Amino acid sequence: MPTIPSPSLPLLAVRALAFSRDDVLVFGPLAFSVDANEALLVQGGNGAGKTTLLRVLAGLLRADAGVIEIEGVAADAASRARHIAYLGHLPGLKADLSALHNLHYLCGLHGRRRTQTAEAALGITGLAGYEDAAVRTLSAGQKKRLGLARLWLSPAPLWLLDEPYANLDLDGIHLVNQMVQAHLRAGGAALITTHGAYAAPPVRTRLLELGKHAA
Ligand SMILES: Nc1ncnc2c1ncn2[C@@H]1O[C@H](COP(=O)(O)OP(=O)(O)OP(=O)(O)O)[C@@H](O)[C@H]1O
């Protein structure tokens, strides 16, 4: 289960966060926070900077300005590793390894919830029977489901989900919403980028339109 953060501090707090490329502002300055048991939907059209924001929060890109705090402390590599699970457009899977080996490998790197197993995570995400399938033989939606299985195993309380519904069928969309709901109920939080075409998961949700403050 995720570590339950202190109730007095937001899990994630961002102030005056800005990012530019070649002197062109991509987003910011942004200020928002995300508490335990809460989802923040990051909305915006193509090119609005949603992926860039999540990559900055995950520590994959460096912001030009601003502060990112996790439970009240400036984020660094160690706190991100403990607190953040990032599901990007490319789920970071090894193409020649089997689905099960990928999960074991990722759990070795990032740890796993003590109550979960890789086999159970494959079952939950509809991939039972694909344990020994090489990832390169999986469809785009199946790879996304394997990324969700990895997420489900992660002990990190803060999920950063970049277009988690992409490539998924209706069952898969339902699965994402159920996973987010269960994760928040267990004390976690999630940032979810979306074009707004999908119904938000049935959880306490706030909106961040890039260029505006969280509602
Ligand atoms: N690797 C890159 N090099 C240069 N510019 C980039 C790169 N990645 C993104 N950009 C630019 O940064 C801006 C924000 O891109 P980003 O991918 O964050 O948008 P997005 O809101 O996630 O878009 P989408 O909804 O299309 O996925 C866009 O103008 C894009 O062209």
Image: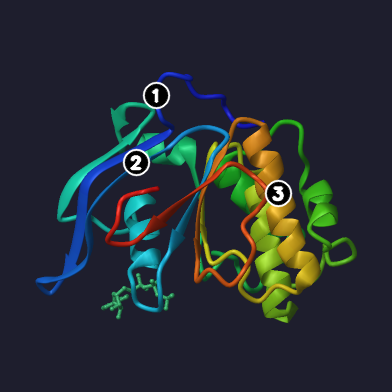
Please rate how many residues cluster around mark 2, counting C-alpha atoms within 10 Å: few if below 14, some from 14 to 19, many from 20.
Answer: few
Q: Residue 53 carries which label?
A: none
> Can you tell which of label 3 and label 2 is closer to the viewer?
3
Sequence-first tag of 1 and 2: 1
Residue 17: % across, % down:
22, 50
Which residue lies at the image location 39% right of the left edge and 65% below the top edge? 50
Q: Residue furthest right?
A: 129
* Residue 187, visible in the rendered structure: yes
- Near-viewer residue (77 or 52): 52
Cα distance in 3D space between marks 1 and 2? 20 Å
Q: Mark 3 points at which residue?
A: 179
Q: In the rendered structure, are the residues bearing label 1 and label 2 in contact, judged by CB atoms less than 8 Å apart?
A: no
Q: Quick check: 112 left or right of 30?
A: right
Decide: is 101 above or below 120.
below
> Can you tell which of label 1 and label 2 is closer to the viewer?
1
* Residue 156, visible in the rendered structure: no
Q: Name the residue under label 2.
A: 77
Q: Which mark is residue 9?
A: 1
